[in-house]
C-alpha cells in the first residue's frame, strides 16, 4: 500500500530528475551517477523513493555501512535510491536533505555528522510529510517527532564492553591492583558514537581507583590522525599501559606509532590495545595478538532501515529506537568470525 501523496511525489520526482539529466547534458562537471543510484531518472511509480545522506567515507566501517544500504535499496527490491556523500561536512548534509525534500522523496535516511543543528531542516521534512530515519548516530532536537526512528549500535554499551574487556585482560595478567595508565583516542567531537563510547567506558573506569586516564583526544576516526595523536601521546607520557581507540582506523594508525616508538602492542607487550568496529583487518590483528579486544560495531544496518520502511509502508507501528546486534572479539572467539568473512 502506498502512503497518501506518494503518486504526486513520484510525478514531481520524475520531473526533477529529468531536469537534472537535461542540465547535466548541457553543462560540464555534473556527476549524476555519483549522486543517484544507477544514474538514471526513475519512471516506475511502484518504486519507493529513499533519499540517503551518508557522512562520508572516512573509515573502513563507514564504507561497509554504505554498502549495506546500497545492497538493500535496489530496484529489484522495490526501491529507487538517491544517495549523497556529505564528505564530513554538516552543511553538505543539510543541503542534501533539502534536496531530498524538494524532490519529494518518500523517505529520508541519514547518519548525522554531529548531534546538534538539525531542528530546522528536520522540521522542513516533517512539514513536507516525509518520514526521517536516523542511521548509526543520533540527533538532539527539541521535538523528537521530527524523526520516526533511529537504527544503530548501543554506543554506551559498547564503551562498557570495552571496559569489561580491559578488566578481564588485567585479571589474566594479575594486575588488578596495579596502577594502570590509560590514553583514549576518541572519534569526531560531538558524534553520537564518540559520546556514547566515552560515557560507557568511563562508567567502568570509575569503578577502579587504580585506573588513571592520562588524556582523551579527538583523533577524528581516521588512520592519519590516530597515528599523529598516538605519536604525540607516546612522546608526552613516559609510560602508557592501555590504549582505548574508538575505531579500528585510528587503531591502525596508533599501532604504527607504537611500533615506531620501539614498543610492542598486545597483552604480552607494552601497551594493551582495545579497539572498536571489528573490521576484518582489525580482527586479524586480534588473532595475531596486537589488539587484545575489538568491540563490534555492526555496519550492516541497511536491512534494519528497510525493515522500518516496510512496516511504515504497511501502516504498522515502528519502534523509536532499534539496536543492532553486537559482540566483543578476543583471541578466544575471533577465528570463528574470520572464517565467516
Image (cartoon, rainbow, N blue to C red):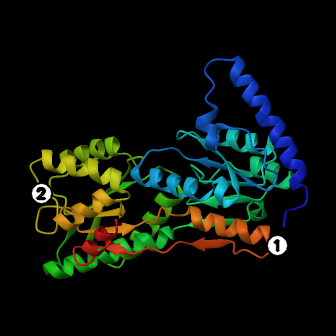
Neighbor class of circle 1 (other Cα within 10 Å; few <14, some 14-19, many 20+) is few
- 129 vs 284, left or right, is right
Q: Residue furthest left?
A: 262
Q: Which residue is mark 2?
A: 264
- Please state the horizontal and vertical placement of residue 287, each as a whole percent of the image: 20, 67
Q: Please tell me in which quadrant of the rendered image residue 144 appears.
A: bottom right
Q: Position of residue 80 (x, y in %)?
A: 70, 50
- Above or below, 59 against 78 in this view is above
Residue 33 vertical placement versus 242 (above, below): above
Q: Is residue 71 left or right of residue 282?
A: right
Percent x, y of residue 273: 24, 63
Q: Residues within 10 Å of mark 2 (few under 14, many from 20)?
A: some
Q: In the rendered image, is residue 242 in sight?
A: no
Residue drawn 25% across and 43% down?
232
In the rendered image, the quadrant that contains the C terminus is bottom left
Image side of residue 265 versus residue 9, left or right: left
The answer to whether any part of residue 172 appears in the image is yes
Determine the residue positioned at 80% across, 51% down: 125
Would residue 95 appear left or right of 257 to someone viewing this image?
right
**On residue 251, which mark appears?**
none
User: Measured along the vertical axis of the image, is residue 15 above or below residue 303?
Assistant: above
Q: Quadrant of the N terminus?
A: bottom right
Place residue 270 in its image quadrant.
bottom left
Determine whether the residue tagged by mark 1 lies in a helix, strand or loop: loop
Return the residue at label 1: 315
Compared with 92, 165 (above or below) is below
How many marks the image carries: the answer is 2
The answer to which of 300 and 133 lies nearer the viewer is 300
Question: In terms of sequence position, does the residue under pointer 1 or pointer 2 come before the other?
Answer: 2
Q: Position of residue 14 (x, y in %)?
A: 81, 40
Between the C-alphas of marks 1 and 2, the distance is 56 Å
Amino acid at each position: 500500500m502506498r502512503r497518501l501523496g506518494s503518486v504526486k511525489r513520484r510525478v514531481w520526482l520524475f520531473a526533477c530528475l529529468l531536469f537534472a539529466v537535461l542540465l547535466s547534458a548541457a553543462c560540464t562537471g555534473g556527476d549524476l551517477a555519483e549522486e543517484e543510484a544507477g544514474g538514471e531518472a526513475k519512471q516506475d511509480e511502484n518504486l519507493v523513493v529513499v533519499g540517503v545522506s551518508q557522512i562520508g567515507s572516512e573509515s573502513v566501517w563507514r564504507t561497509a555501512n554504505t554498502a549495506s544500504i546500497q545492497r538493500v535499496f535496489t530496484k529489484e527490491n522495490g526501491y529507487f535510491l538517491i544517495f549523497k556523500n556529505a564528505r564530513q561536512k554538516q552543511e553538505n548534509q543539510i543541503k542534501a536533505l533539502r534536496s531530498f525534500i524538494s524532490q519529494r522523496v518518500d523517505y529520508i535516511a541519514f547518519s548525522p555528522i554531529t548531534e546538534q543543528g538539525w531542528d530546522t531542516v528536520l522540521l522542513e521534512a516533517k512539514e513536507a510529510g516525509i518520514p526521517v530515519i536516523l542511521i548509526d548516530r543520533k540527533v538532539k532536537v527539541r521535538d523528537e517527532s521530527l524523526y520516526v526512528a533511529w537504527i544503530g549500535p548501543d554506543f554506551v554499551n559498547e564503551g562498557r564492553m570495552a571496559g569489561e574487556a580491559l578488566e578481564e585482560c588485567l585479571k589474566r595478567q594479575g594486575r588488578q591492583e596495579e596502577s594502570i595508565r590509560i590514553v583514549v583516542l576518541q572519534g569526531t567531537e560531538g558524534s553520537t558514537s564518540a559520546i556514547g563510547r566515552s560515557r560507557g567506558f568511563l562508567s567502568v573506569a570509575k569503578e577502579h581507583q587504580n585506573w588513571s586516564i592520562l588524556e582523551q583526544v579527538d583523533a577524528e576516526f581516521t588512520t592519519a590522525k590516530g597515528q599523529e595523536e598516538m605519536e604525540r601521546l607516546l612522546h608526552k607520557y613516559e609510560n602508557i599501559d592501555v590504549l582505548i581507540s574508538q575505531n579500528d582506523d585510528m587503531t591502525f594508525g596508533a599501532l604504527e606509532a607504537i611500533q615506531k616508538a620501539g614498543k610492542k602492542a598486545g597483552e604480552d607487550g607494552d601497551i594493551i590495545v582495545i579497539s572498536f568496529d571489528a573490521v576484518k583487518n582489525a580482527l586479524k590483528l586480534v588473532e595475531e595478538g596486537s589488539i587484545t579486544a575489538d568491540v563490534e560495531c555492526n555496519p550492516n544496518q541497511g536491512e534494519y532501515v528497510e525493515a522500518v520502511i516496510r512496516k511504515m509502508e504497511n501502516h504498522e507501528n515502528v519502534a523509536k529506537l532499534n539496536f543492532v546486534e553486537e559482540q566483543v572479539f578476543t583471541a578466544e572467539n575471533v577465528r570463528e568470525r574470520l572464517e565467516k568473512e
